[in-house]
Amino acid sequence: MNKKCLLLFSLLAAFLVSCGQAPVQKEETVATETLPEPETEAAPEPVPEAAGCEYNADCEQGWLCINRECKTLASLYKTDCENKCTITGVKVATSDGEEYDLTLGQGSYTAAGALEWKLLKTPDYCQGEDPLVALNIIKKTTGKVVGEQVLTLHKGETSEAVTHPTVKSVKFTATLADMTEKCS
């Protein structure tokens, strides 16, 4: 045998012998008495911070991507009051040159259905508030939804330009031309 193999064999043998002679230590288990933890009042669950988003799917379940932030629709309205109002009708003008007289829950589409929009039903809000109308924007490709987002408008406002991920010619806007409400 050559010297390198002999040296390697010797080191290996020394290692194996030393491993076999290592003292074995027994672990002792000691019974410990567990004391009950002091009762504490449960802390309220933190309210999630509004996160940035592009589509409703980017938000936690039950939240919507409203004006690029994850929120609930109810969080946009003041509802803790005696006299409440509800939106009864909306007039929307679109960048397509169309005008619609609608109630909440109704909507329309543009770009051969690539972009659909629908007015969301909103909670009753306090009288005297400047109410928001929420538009759910649904982007589709070959009939399949590729993203949804929500934009809000006050009376007289025009939305930001809504584009489509695959139809580059889409630059849709909606203007809340008028709104009627009924208050109790």
Image (spheres, rainbow, N blue to C red):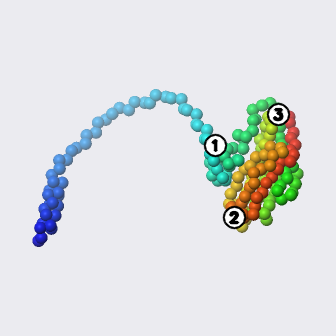
Quadrant where the C terminus is found in the figure:
top right
Mark 1 is surrounded, within 10 Å at the Cα level, by few (under 14), some (14 to 19) or many (20 or more) other residues, namely: some
Q: Reading the chain from its start, which is encountered first: label 1 or label 3?
A: 1
Quadrant where the N terminus is found in the figure:
bottom left
**In-image side of 12 versus 152 (left or right):** left
Residue that label 3 marks: 128
Residue at 61% across / 41% down in the picture? 49
Q: Is residue 34 visible?
A: yes
**In-image side of 90 versus 3 (left or right):** right
Q: Reading the chain from its start, which is encountered first: label 2 or label 3?
A: 3
Q: Which residue is more in the foreground, 86 or 39?
A: 86
Residue at 83% across / 59% down in the picture? 96
Residue that label 2 marks: 166
**In-image side of 38 versus 62 (left or right):** left
Q: Position of residue 33 (x, y in %)?
A: 35, 32
Amino acid at dot 3:
Gly
Separation of marks 1 and 2 at Cα, in angstroms = 28 Å
Amino acid at dot 1:
Ala
Q: Which numbered tag is attached to residue 36?
A: none
Mark 3 is surrounded, within 10 Å at the Cα level, by few (under 14), some (14 to 19) or many (20 or more) other residues, namely: few
Q: Indicate the secondary structure of the residue bearing disc 3.
A: loop
Q: Reading the chain from its start, which is encountered first: label 1 or label 2?
A: 1
Residue that label 1 marks: 50
Residue at 46% across / 28% down in the picture? 38
